[in-house]
Image (spheres, rainbow, N blue to C red):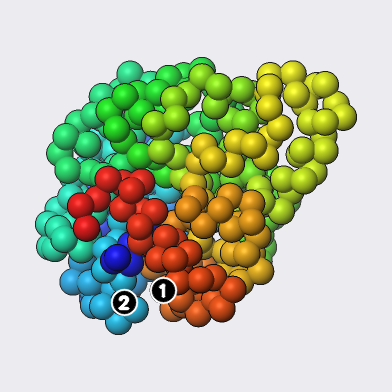
Amino acid sequence: MKTIDIHSHFYPDNIADMETRFGDGIWPGFRKISDENGMITFDGGDYRPIYDACWSPARRIEELDKHGVDIQIICATPILFAYSKPPQQSLECAKVMNDTALEMCSHNTGRLKAMCQVPLQDIDLACGEASRAMASGHVGVQIGNHVNEKNLDDEGLITFLQHCADIGAPVLIHPWDMMAPERMPKYMLQWLVAMPAETQLSILSLILSGAFERLPRKLNLCFAHGGGSFAYLMGRVDNAWKHRDVVRKDCPHLPSSYTDRFYLDSAVFSEDALDLLVKCSGADRIMFGTDYPFPLGEIDMGALVRGHDGLDEKQKASILGSNAARFFNLDV
């Protein structure tokens, strides 16, 4: 079985100048520093330094070979979602990013696959772009864990997830636009504290709202970053469900019983954390993910799973590749 990384990002060095194109608003941009280094820009300032693995498929393949990763699924950096923009602008941005992703993958279609993005603030446009992208060669859809003030239990977002189930589009849910930035301005605390909380919020939004009772089991969902704080706090949620009717009002079954309705990636950076995910969801519900090529990702790709003495060879094979092959319906 091949090793498949299901969580990695790209950012093109020739990104369209959206601000000039649309004439207003604040859009992400790019400033090239050298052939190997660049800077994502936003709102007139520097946002994040990146290097050429974000835009060079050749460099990406070189690093995959170094770490023994056979296939990598790429998706846009979440700052490009543009959910707060006018829907037609967001749609145009999505089309540019989706076509760019496929162009990158054309460097080696056996090694690189892509997930599309959609203008999720407009459900009709989102469904249309998801269908177009899947027909064009994408293997799934990446969405943010909320759209402005709407969590995943919003009826429009449930409609979109139903559409993904109907067209056979697996969905990766990625945290973004993190909560309470005014309280976390330093030390990357938005990524270290708010990002896990955002993911926990999105999982519980689906479970406690009863959304999984309405969504078909054929829908393949995966939550990035190991589901954030979900596994660690599952006991707290179950306890609340048992003792408070307001928690179980729309959720007919124990919250932990829904762990067979979604997958998690393995980007948790700790053997103890990975053990907890296996206990919580089972090794058949965890997929290898790195968050490559960002510095908060797994730098030595695959080392956590391969070097974990507490996992047997079958569990390692499931996490490293076979679960992803099944999830994305890959012929490998």
Indicate the secondary structure of the residue bearing disc 1. loop
Residue 66, visible in the rendered structure: yes
| Image location of residue 108, percent across then percent down | 14, 63
The spot of residue 107 in percent (x, y) is 12, 62
Residue 192 is tagged as none
Kindly indicate the quadrant of the structure image that contains residue 95: top left
Check disc 1 and report the residue beneath it: 301
Q: Give 112 or 182, whichever is nearer the viewer.
A: 112
Locate the N terminus by quadrant.
bottom left
3 or 24, nearer to the observer: 3
Q: In this view, does 310 lie above or below 219?
A: below
The answer for how far apart the CA atoms under marks 2 and 1 are is 8 Å
Which residue occupies the foreground of this view, 270 or 259? 259
Q: Are marks 2 and 1 in contact (CB under 8 Å)?
A: yes
Disc 1 marks a residue whose amino acid type is: Met
Q: 13 above or below 309?
A: above
Instruction: Say if residue 85 shows up in the picture.
Output: no
For discs 2 and 1, the disc positioned in front in the rendered view: 2
Q: Position of residue 153 (x, y in %)?
A: 57, 25
Q: Quarter of the image holding residue 67?
A: bottom left
Q: Quick check: 100 left or right of 191? A: left
Query: Who's the residue at 64% across and 51% down the image?
Result: 280
| Disc 2 residue type (three-letter) | Gly
Label 2: which residue?
68
Q: Is residue 207 left or right of residue 141?
A: right
Residue at the spot x=25%, y=34% of the render?
Answer: 92
